[in-house]
Amino acid sequence: LNTTSNLRQALSEEVERLRPRAGLEERVLRGLRANSQPIQRQRVGRPRQQERGEWVRPHPATALIAALLTIVVVVTLVYAARSSHQVQSSPATVPRPGTVVVPVTLPAWTWFFSPKDAALLIDVADPKNPNGVLSERLLITHDGGRNWLSTDEPAIVGGPRVFWIDAKHIVYDAESGIETTTDGGIHWTRTQVEPGFEGAFWSTYFLTTTEGWALQSNNVIYRTSDSGASWEKLATIGSDLAAPSPQLIFTDPMHGFIAGNSQDGAGRFFVTSDGGRTWRLVPLPAPAAGWPAYGTIEVPTFFGKQGFALYTASGGTFYVYFTADAGSTWSSPRPFPYYPGRPTFINTSDGWAVDSTGVEYRTFDGGISWQAVSYSLPGYLLRTIAPVGGDVVWATASKAGSPIDYGVRSTDGGVTWSFIKLPVQ
Amino acid sequence: VAQGVAAVAVDEQLLAAAKAGDQESFARLIEPYIAPGYRLAASMLGDTGLAEDVVQESTLRAWRAIGHLMTSSRVRPWFLTIVANRARTLRQRRWWSVVMLPLSASDAVRAKQGPDDHADLLQALRGLHADERAAIYLRFYEEMNSHEIGDALGISASAVRSRIHRALRRLRVELTEEDL
């Protein structure tokens, strides 16, 4: 047996091996001073509506277009004033002449896509400075990138998760709280599920615009029936769920799943049939070679009563579990024989994936066979892929070795791609 | 004691000034935690370039979220939380390039059997899951207790102890109650 003294010695050697170049603090603070605009400090009270969000539409910034747009704005405002209280109350949703900008192709640090052809991105990157951020605003599109909402960023710390309910309702897991919007992202309301709790959120799921559940890192499950304004503590599940973070999903108001892993790597589902008040463990069959040291079971995806769940074993082998009875029983895990990368399915048969070298794959038989899709994106590699439906698909792409991603979109099954242009002033 | 009280008072003044928009006060407040943040990211990612990216980005995010920090006494776990989350996000995004740097088959077998010398201990350390490596690093290098580590990693103190206990078993390190 080793001693903790041996371990401390080994850690010291690792720290030395991974020692940064001299002047780390100086470089980091220089980057802070160069790239950070103090736009969001100390959010005391709610910002004025005009500061919270504005719709901007990419368009060549010519005088003619600006003049036409001004006319459109005036007409729209007159129409809005006459027709609908909803539009009346949201003047920030119409383009203002001052917000017309030249759209440019820029990367961003974090992209989220929804199956409704929407995208949300955080931190538009400065291409001249690999660590820099050009825009600290959050950008959302609901129409495939034609129009963008530019809004103050909700309080992001760490790796946020975005849950799309519909075009108007988005839930955004932030620092020990949840940000929700009911107007497509113009206004955000922050709620804290458990006041005083400073841990992390593992998962949020909304079945409707009002009814949702949240799972915190202390394994406590909460339910809301008023869009997150208030939360009821429902239950605490087994304490040996381990990172990576467990996720939850509900298929109707009574039936839900939590997918997680035990400390020794076994995938497991907790299932409820009473809306989340009680949970029972559903054992999953182990892969033929047994449970690996580490693995990640993902929350199941359902298409009617049929569903599947992916299990990623350490070493990169992927398995898929199938159910034909809405999750009551699960098949033995089937390895993906030609598994090319993390797949995303839009129904039980049609799925997409991208492998580590940027090769794009598609399956039409539920992952039994995969065909490489030949595409042209010179100088860039696809990184992630997010199908919308049919032949419409979003993806991120980056230059080799770059940590920042460009958004791209295809409407012909991933053969040709267009870079997403962003309205950054 | 008097020096400690004075230091806390200074940090509280720096925090108040940072919340009011003084970036230099924020820089003074966060500077002591940049190196620990870098080491945490490096321990999770095993890559110096990515670790520096993470700590750079985390510093920017901390500055933008400084209004949410209630007391200067929580700067370290708060900042390390940001770093750990960013490192996790980057690790997920770079799933194949980072997580797929596995031990070779023979190394994996050897690590499973347990390290029996210093080189094997190093190898086994690198073979731990990133979240376990983070917990081990914070406990035995930064000398943080399980509550502080739990704050930083977003898990309970008991989960921290469980994680460390399991990692030490895999490393075949003799453990005592104090080590947890």
Image: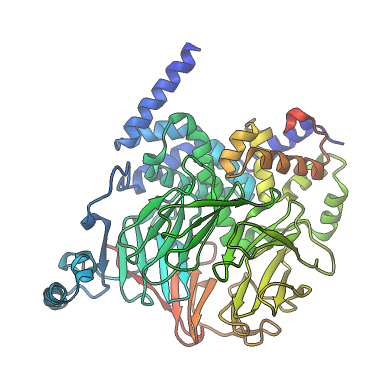
Q: Quadrant of the C terminus of chain A?
A: bottom left
Q: Residue at x 19, y 74 (%)?
A: A84
Q: Is residue A136 above or below residue A420?
A: above
Residue B48 horizontal/vertical position (percent): 58, 48
Residue B3 horizontal/vertical position (percent): 47, 14
Q: Examine the rendering and report whether any part of residue A360 can be seen.
A: no
Left or right: A15 as drawn, with respect to A76: right
Farthest residue, direction front: A274
- Most foreground residue, A333 or B134: A333
Q: Is residue A371 above or below residue A11?
A: below
Farthest residue, direction top: B2
Q: Examine the rendering and report whether any part of residue B84 can be seen.
A: yes
Left or right: A40 as drawn, with respect to A225: left
* Quarter of the figure with residue A209: bottom left
Residue A259 horizontal/vertical position (percent): 65, 62
Q: Residue at x 69, y 46 (%)?
A: B132
Left or right: A366 as drawn, with respect to B125: left
Q: Quadrant of the N terminus of chain A?
A: top right
